[in-house]
Image (spheres, grey):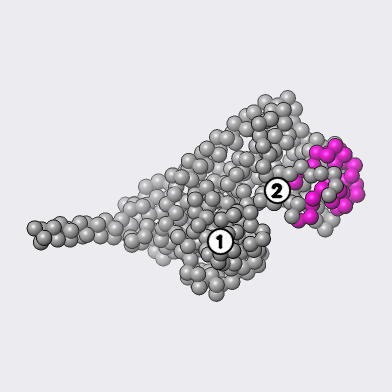
Amino acid sequence: MFRRLNKVFLVFILISSLVLLAGCGKGKGETAAGAVELKYATGFKIEHLAGGCKRVTDGEGRKLILVPRGQRPPSGYGNLPVVYTPVRRVVIGSTAQAALLRPLGELGSIIGVTTEKEHWHLEAVKEGLEQGRIQLVGSGMGPLDYDRVVALRPDLVLIYTGTPGSSETLRKLEELKVPVAVENSHLEQHPLGRMEWVKFLAAFYGKEKEAAEFFEAAAKRTAKIAREAASAKAKPKVLWGSIYQGKVYVPAGASYAARMIEMAGGDYLFKDLAGTGSSTVTLEEFYARGKNADVYISSTMPNYGITSIAKIVEQGKVLKDLLPVKEGKVWCFQPWYYQSLDKTDEMIADLAAIFHPELFPEVKIKHHLRLPASS
C-alpha cells in the first residue's frame, strides 16, 4: 500500500513538474494569445503568452518577458530580460507609482523609494520608512544609490524617463543586471491614460483582473461626471497655472490637465496653446487672458509656500486685479495631489464641483483646496 501511494505521489510530482517546466517552454509561434486591452494609454503593451507568461513593452519600448515563478523562460525570445512574477520586492522611482500600487493592494511590496519620509502622504509607505522596512535609495530626481539598490536584491525596479539623467539611470541598472521596467504614465495625454498604467503594474503582480475592474469602475464614474458637466448651460472660464521665478507655467492645449478641465465642463483660457506638456507665458499674457476668468486653479500646493491668495499676488502685483482673485475663487492642489494618480476620477469630480457647484452639490472636494485671502 505504501509503495502504491508512493508511486502515485511520484507520478503527481512528475506531472506537476512537467506542467511547470513546459508552461513557458514553447516557441513564440505557438504561444501568442492576445493582448491586454487599453482604452486610453498609449505608452505600453502587454501580450499574453502560453503558460501564464507575458511579453511586456515598457515606457521606453523595451520588451520584457514575465514568467511565473517556478517556470522556465520561454524559448524563441532571444535575450529579452526576464522578470519572475509575482514580484514581491519592488523599488519605486516616483510617488505616482506608489499611488498605482494602492488599488492593487501591493503597497506592502515596496522596499525602496526615492522620496523622503516627510513628503509621503501614503501612510503605508511612511510607516515602512519609519520602521526601516522601506529604504531610501535616492533623493527626488537625483541619481539612485546603486549600491543600496543592489544590496536590497529587488525583484523589480520601476523608474520613469523623460527627465535629465533618467536614460543614464536605466543604462546603469541594466548594466548591473537589476530587473528594471520603465513606467511613463506622466507622458500620457489623457488623464485616464495616465491612470490606465495601473494595468502595466498589475502585470508584474498577476493582478490584471483586479486592475481591469478598478479601471473600468473609475472610467464609468468619470464618464458620468463628464455627461452631467456637459449639461451645464454655460462653461466657466478657467485660468490654470503656476509662477516660478517670474515665469508662468500653463498646461498646453492637448495636455492631460487641459482635458481634465474640458471633462469637468470648464473653458480653459489657454486651450489654443500647441503641445501636450506645459508651456511658459509671460505674466502680462497670463493676466491679459485671465483677467475676467471665473475660476483660477493655481497648480501649486500649500506645502510649497502658496497658502493664500495674498501669497500668489506676491508673485506678481498685477494678479491682484484678476477677477477670481478679487472674488476669492482661487484653488490650489492639496499636498497629496501628486500621490493620488489612482484617484483621477475624484480629481475630475472636484473640478466639476468647483466649476458647477449647482450640478454637483453632493461632491466633497478632496484633492483641491480653496485658498483663503491671507494666511
> What's under tag 2, amino acid-wise?
Gln
Is residue 203 rendered magenta in the image?
no
Instruction: Work out whether residue 341 or residue 53 is closer to the camera in this orientation and state it.
Output: 341
Residue drawn at (62%, 32%) of the image: 225
Q: Which residues are magenta?
A: 304-333
Please give the label number shown on residue 334. 2
The disc label shown at residue 280, or none: none
| Amino acid at circle 1 | Gly
Q: Is residue 259 left or right of residue 57?
A: right
In the image, what residue occupies the spot 18% across and 58% down? Answer: 9
Q: Is residue 345 visible?
A: yes
Residue 235 placement (x, y as % from top left): 74, 31
For mark 1, what is the residue? 128
Query: Is residue 306 part of the magenta span, yes or no?
Result: yes
The secondary structure type at the circle numbered 2 is loop
Of helix, strand and loop, which one carries label 1? Answer: helix
- Image-based side of 137 in relation to 372, left or right: left
314 on left or right of 174: right
Residue 168 appears in the figure: no
- Specify which label sits upstream in the sequence, 1 or 2: 1
Q: CA distance from mark 1 to mark 2?
A: 23 Å
Q: Position of residue 229 (x, y in %)?
A: 67, 30
Say if 118 sits above or below 283 in the image: below
Classify residue 143 by image quadrant.
bottom right
Given this view, does label 1 or label 2 mark the residue nearer the observer? 1
Return the x and y of residue 246 as percentages of the image width and height.
84, 56
Point out the image quarter for the N terminus.
bottom left
Residue occupying image coordinates x 87% and y 52%: 314
Q: Is residue 306 above or below residue 159?
A: above
